[in-house]
Amino acid sequence: MAIWECAYKQALVHPVKSLTAIFWAWKFLLFLIITLSPGPGYDTCTTLLSRNPDISDHAGDFGYAGLPAILLRFVRWDSIYFLRVAERGYLFEQEWAWGYGYTRLLSSLTSVFHRTDEMGGAAKIAIVGVGLSHLTHFLSVLALYGLTKKAFGTEKVSEKAFCFISALLHIITPAGAFLSAPYGEPVFSLLNFAGFYIYASALHSDRLGKPAVRDAQLLLAASSFAIATTVRSNGIISGSLFAYDCVVLFFQIASGGVSVEAVHRLIITILGGIIVALGMILPQYVAYASYCTTGALPRPWCQRLIPSIYTWVQAEYWNVGFLRYWTLSNLPLFCLAAPMLAVLVLSTAWSFKTFFRATGKGIADDGNGCQESIKQRILVQLAIPQALLAVAALTTYHVQIINRISSGYPVWYWYIAAHALQTYKSSKPENRASTAAIRGMAMYGLVQAVLYGSFLPPA
C-alpha cells in the first residue's frame, strides 16, 4: 500500500518532476543491468556489425572502446537490422520488414550528430539509437500523462492520482529493455500517444464550437498516426478512430438527412483516414519503385493486386500469417504473452462496460455532462485499436512481441490504474490483482533486461 500512498502524495505536488525522477532512476537501473549482463549468449550477430579498423579488437566489445562498446550491448535482436539498414540503406529484400520511417530517422540523426569518421558507423548509430529511445520514451510518458489529463481531467485528487499512476505504469511497462535499445517502440509510443492526445483535443474543440480548430487537429492527429505507421506497421490500426467516426457520420446522415456540416465532417474524417493510410503506402511505393520498375525480373509480390513488400517478406522470410504461429513449439511463447493478452482483453471489456453503463444511465445536457460524454467516447474509441492489436497478435503476429508493441496503447494502463486506485480504497481480495500486475511488470522488466543484455530469448 505504500506505493499508493506515495502516488497520492506526488500527484498533489509536482507530478511531472516526480515522473521525471522515477523515469531516469528506472532507466539507470535497466542500463546497469543490460551493460553488466554476461554476453553475448544465444546469438553473436552483433559482432558482425562493422568495426573501426583503427581500433584493436582487444580495445573493447565488438572492436570499440569506451562508450560505444557499452552501448553496443543494447544492439540485440531486431536492433541489429535497424542499425545495419540505417547505416547503408535497404540492400536485401527481407530487410523491408523493419520500419522504413525509423531506419531513415536513425540515419538522418546520425548524419547530423556525427559528422566525423572517428568511429565505425554501427557505433555512431548505436549511440544515436540508444539516446533517441531514452528521449522518446521519456516524452511518451509525458504524452500519456497529458492524454490522461485531457481525457479524465484533474479536478479531483483521485483524478490527479489516476493520471500520475497511468504515466508511471508506462515507465515500467513490460516493453522494458526494448524502450531503451535502438528499437522503434519508444518512437512509436510517442507518436501514437501524441496522435491520441491531438484527437482528444479535437473532440474538446468540437464541444467548444471551434470547427476550424477541430478539423486542423483531426488532420494533425492523422499525420501523427501516419508517421507512427512508418515506424511500426501496427500504427495503421489507429486509423480505426477515423473509420469509427465515418460509420457514426454515415448513420447520422442516413437518419437525420444530408447537411453541409455533416458532409464537411465526413470529408475531413475520410481525408484523415487517407493520411493515416499514406504511412503504410508511401514506404511500399519506395520499395515498388526499387524492385518492380527496374527492368529486371520482378519479384513475385510485384504482380499482386496490392504489391506490398512488407506483407510479402513477413510471410516469406519471417513466417508471419494467419495461425502460422500456432505450433506446439511456440506454446511457451503463447504462455509468455498470455498475461498481456489477458490485460488487453479485460481492459477493452472494461472500457466498453464503462461506456455502456454511462450511456445507459444517460448524461446530463450541461457542461459536466458534455465533458463526461467526451470522456466515455475517448475511452471506448481508444479501446478499439488496442482490441484489434490483441486479435492480430494472437492470430497472426509472433505472439511474444505483444509485450513490447502494446506499450503504445493507453487503455490498458488506465485499466490497471483504475483498479490500483480501487485497491488503495478497499482491502477486498479481488481488488489486489492490480497490485500483483504492477509488481509482475516490474519484475518482468528486470528479468527481461538480464536476458536482453545477455542476448538470450525471448525477444
Image (tube, helix red, strand yellow):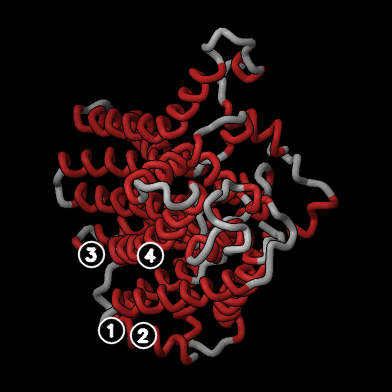
* Residue 25 on image: x %, y %: 43, 78
User: Disc 3 vs disc 4: which is toward the camera?
Assistant: 4
**Helix, strand, or loop for circle 1?**
helix
Q: Tag 1 or tag 4, which sits nearer the N-term?
A: 1
What distance separates the C-alpha of mark 3 from that of mark 2?
Answer: 24 Å
Q: CA distance from mark 3 to mark 1?
A: 23 Å
- Report the residue marked by disc 1: 12
Number of other residues with Cα within 10 Å of mark 1, as a class: few under 14, some 14 to 19, many 20 or more: some
Where is the C terminus found, in terms of image quarters?
bottom right
Between discs 3 and 4, the one toward the N terminus: 4
Residue that mark 3 sits on: 368
Judged left or right of residue 221, residue 293 is right
Q: Is residue 263 above or below residue 173?
A: above
Lower sequence index among marks 3 and 1: 1
Which residue is painted at 68% across and 48% down in the image?
398
Q: Which residue is mark 4?
A: 138
For marks 4 and 1, give the CA distance.
21 Å
Q: Which residue is mark 2?
A: 8
Q: Position of residue 62 (x, y in %)?
A: 61, 57
